[in-house]
Amino acid sequence: MKSKHRCGSKSIPVRVNAMMQTNGNRVPDLKEVYKSTHFNENTKMWISEESEKNYGKIIEVEAEHAEAGVTPITQEELSIKSLKAKSGYVKGLGMRPSSSLRTTVASAANSQCVSHLESLVQEYQEERQSQQQKIDVLSESNKQMELTTATIMEYLKHQGNGFSEYIENSRST
């Protein structure tokens, strides 16, 4: 079922173009365009239940992609996910899809790859930290062993020259 809109004689593409000219040639937010064309400000009512549901879906999808760690979504992608795709046309924005839309699948794959790589980096950092702790423990243990050996050697030197000469001879052979 087609969703009606309240654009009058001014088409959605014309409205979107006017909005783009006022905001630095950026594609306007889908939710703004959709609300301006499907919500009656005078009566404070949606023109249909379907329009209200679609707007809710736009808000929901946009919120999902606004969370931390989630790849941001373009207005074109938002249109496809919330208003159902229509071949060669971006619903709600009255425009043809850009090349960025064609890379949506690649973008999703890249997003998964980035997430996987981030988890690997985290895993490797934790492993490196664990190994560094082991190295620190072994290094401290080695220092203690060297100190103990030096103390024993010093003690034995004071006990008698005979043993000291034996040690010196065993090192030279």
Image (tube, rainbow, N blue to C red):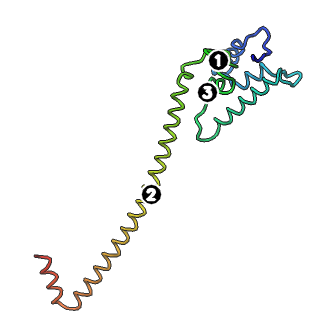
What residue is rendered at 14% in x and 85% in y?
Answer: 165
Decide: marks 2, 1 in contact (CB < 8 A)?
Answer: no
In x, y percent, where is residue 167? 17, 82
Q: Which residue is mark 3?
A: 74
Q: CA distance from mark 2 to mark 3?
A: 39 Å
Q: Which residue is mark 2?
A: 129
Q: CA distance from mark 2 to mark 1?
A: 51 Å
Q: Is residue 125 above or below residue 60?
A: below
Q: Residue furthest right?
A: 43
For label 2, count other residues whose C-alpha is less than 10 Å away and answer few (under 14), some (14-19) or many (20+): few
Q: Quadrant of the N terminus?
A: top right
Q: Residue furthest top?
A: 9
Which label number is shown at residue 86? 1
Q: Quadrant of the C terminus?
A: bottom left
Label 2 vs label 1, nearer the camera: 1
Q: CA distance from mark 3 to mark 1?
A: 17 Å
Q: In the figure, residue 75 lies in which quadrant?
A: top right
Earlier along the polypeptide chain: callout 2 or callout 3? 3
Q: Tell me which amino acid carries mark 2.
A: Gln
Q: Tell me which amino acid carries mark 1.
A: Lys
What residue is rendered at 37% in x and 68% in y?
Answer: 138
Looking at the rendered structure, the secondary structure element under dot 3 is loop
In x, y percent, where is residue 129? 44, 57
Q: Tell me which amino acid carries mark 3.
A: Thr
Looking at the rendered structure, the secondary structure element under dot 1 is loop
**Numbered marks: total:** 3
In x, y percent, where is residue 35? 77, 23
Label 3 vs label 1, nearer the camera: 1
| Viewer-side residue, 111 vs 156 | 111
For label 1, count other residues whose C-alpha is less than 10 Å away and answer few (under 14), some (14-19) or many (20+): few
What residue is rendered at 32% in x and 76% in y?
Answer: 145
What residue is rendered at 38% in x and 70% in y?
Answer: 140
